[in-house]
Image (tube, rainbow, N blue to C red):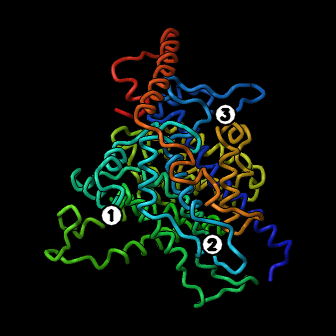
Amino acid sequence: MPSPATTHLLHTTTQDLIAGVIIGSALGDAIGLYTEFMPASLAATAYPSRSFTLTGTPTNPTPTPFHFDTHRAPFQPGRWTDDTDHALLILLAFLHTARTPTPDEPASSLPLPTQQELAKRLRVWTSQGFKPLGTMPLGLGRLVGSVVSSAGFDSDPESVARGYWERTGKRVAPNGSLMRTWPVGVFCAFRGGFPWDEDGVAKGDGYDGKGEEEAFATAASLSRVTHVDPRCVLSCVIGTGLVRGLLRGEVAVESDIDALIHRALGWYSRQHGNRPKKGDEEPSPNGNPEDENDHKIDESELWKHISPSTTLSQLHLDDQPTIGYVYKTLGAGVTSLRLAIRAVTNTKAAKSTRTKLFEDLTTSLTLHGGDADTNACFAGALLGGYLGYGALPDHWKHGLQHEDWLLQKSDALCRVLGVQEGEYDGSKDADVEPEGGKPVIGQQEMEGRWMVLQQETFRKMEETAKRGVTKAGGSWWQKAVGRG
C-alpha cells in the first residue's frame, strides 16, 4: 500500500493537473480571442509586442486591449467564448449527478453525461446564454445553431445532426464538438483502473484497458449530438484520450501521443468495421440508408495534421475557407503538446522552461490567427493537463473572468473523483442544474438583453470609429455576436 504521504502527493499533483486542464482551456480561449478570424499577417500587425496580458504587468499595467473590430466589440479582455461555455455544459452535466463516493464505491459508479442531457443544455444555452454566470450566448456557429433549433433535437439529437450532415453533402467537418469534449477525459481519468498495482508492478493480462474505451465511446457519443462527420468524431476520441492519458501519467513522452492515436484509430475501426454491405444498409432515422463510407477515415489526411513532423505553419491555420476544419484544431493541439514535451524533456532547460512554456506556446499559436480561440482552447486543455495549474502564467490566470468560479468547479470535480478531501453533492449545487438554478428567461427579456448589449457595443464602435480605428456598417451587429 502507498504511504499516506505518497497518496497525498499523488492527489495534490492530480488536483493541479485537473485545474490545469480546466483553467488552461479557458485561458487558451480568452487569449485566442485576440486574433480569432485574423490572418497571421494582421495578427502580427495588431499585436507588435507579440505578447498578451490579462492583468497588466509592471511595464504595462492594464490588460492588453483588443485590436478593435466588430467581432471583438462585445467582449472584454479575460472573457472566454462559446468554446468554453459548451465544454462547461458537459462538465456541469457530469457534476449534476455526481457526489463524493464512499470508500468502497469505484469511480466508474458515477454516471456519464448522455446525448439527451447535452442536447437539453445546448437548447438552454442557445436561447438564454450560460445561465450560472449570466453571460450571453455569443458566437453561436451555423452548424450548432441549425441542429439545436431543429425539431426532435431534444429526444434524438444524433438523428437530427445526421440529417443536417446529409443535407449538406456530408462535407462539413468543423471543430465545434472537439472544443467541448475534453472534460470527458477528466471524468474518465480513473475509470478502468491502472495497468499496474499499488506497488508499481505490471498487472499484465489482469488489465483490459476498458476505461480508455469507455472514454472513447463517451466522447464519440457527445460529438454526435451535433457533429457526426467521422473526422469530428475521431478528433473528439483522440482529444479526450490525450486528456485522460495526461492525467494518468500515461502520456508523458512524445511516443505516448502516437501510441494513443493508434489505439484511438483501432477502437474507431472496430466500432465501424462491421457495417452493412452495400444494398443491405439500414435506413437512417432521416429515411436515407447509411453508406459504408459514412464512417471511413482517410488516415493519411489525419496524420498530415498530427504527425511528429507537422508544424503550426504547415497547418495553415489562417487559410480562410478552412479555418474551422476540425483536423486543424486537432493538429494545433497535438503539435503544441509535442512542442511542450520536447521542451520539458530537454533536461538542460526543463525547470526554467516549464513555468513559461504555456504562455509561449499559447501565444505562438494565437499569433497564427484563424480560429485561434478554438485552436488555443483545445491546445490549452492539453498543455494544462501536461504542465499543471501551477505552470500557468499568473498575469493570465488571475485576469481570467470567473477564475474563482472555475476553480470551485475544479475542486468539486476532484472531490467526486476521489483525489481531494471534502464532500460534494451535485444535487445541492444550483449552478449545475440545466437552468443554472435561475428562472427561465423569456424571449422578451432576452431580446431586451440583446438590445442592451447592442447599444453598449455600438457605443464602443462609435468611439473607436471616431479615432479612425474601425467603421461600423451594414450587418456589423450580427457579425459581432454570431447571430447573422
Secondary structure under badge 2?
Answer: loop
Amino acid identity at mark 3: Leu
Label 3 crowd (10 A; few <14 / some 14-19 / many >=20):
many
> Which of the numbered marks, if any, corresponds to residue 298?
1
* Residue at the outermost bottom position: 205
Residue 20 as seen in the image, left or right of residue 188: right
Would you say the residues marked 2 and 1 are in contact, meaning their CB atoms lie under 8 Å apart? no
Amino acid identity at mark 2: Phe
Give the CA distance from mark 2 to mark 1: 31 Å
The answer to whether one can see residue 60 in this image is no
Residue at mark 2: 190
* Residue at the outermost top position: 466
Residue 99 location in percent, x, y?
Answer: 65, 66
Q: Earlier in the sequence, mark 3 or mark 2?
A: 3
The answer to whether one can see residue 450 in this image is yes
Residue 121 location in percent, x, y?
Answer: 46, 52
Give the CA distance from mark 3 to mark 2: 34 Å
Would you say the residues marked 1 and 3 are in contact, meaning their CB atoms lie under 8 Å apart? no
> Which of the numbered marks, if any, corresponds to residue 114?
none
At 54% across and 63% down in the image, what residue appears?
184
At 34% across and 23% down in the image, what residue appears?
475
* Residue at the outermost front position: 439
Residue 451 location in percent, x, y?
Answer: 44, 24
Residue at mark 3: 54
Amino acid identity at mark 1: Asp
Rendered view: 420 above or below 176: below
At 59% across and 49% down in the image, what residue appears?
25
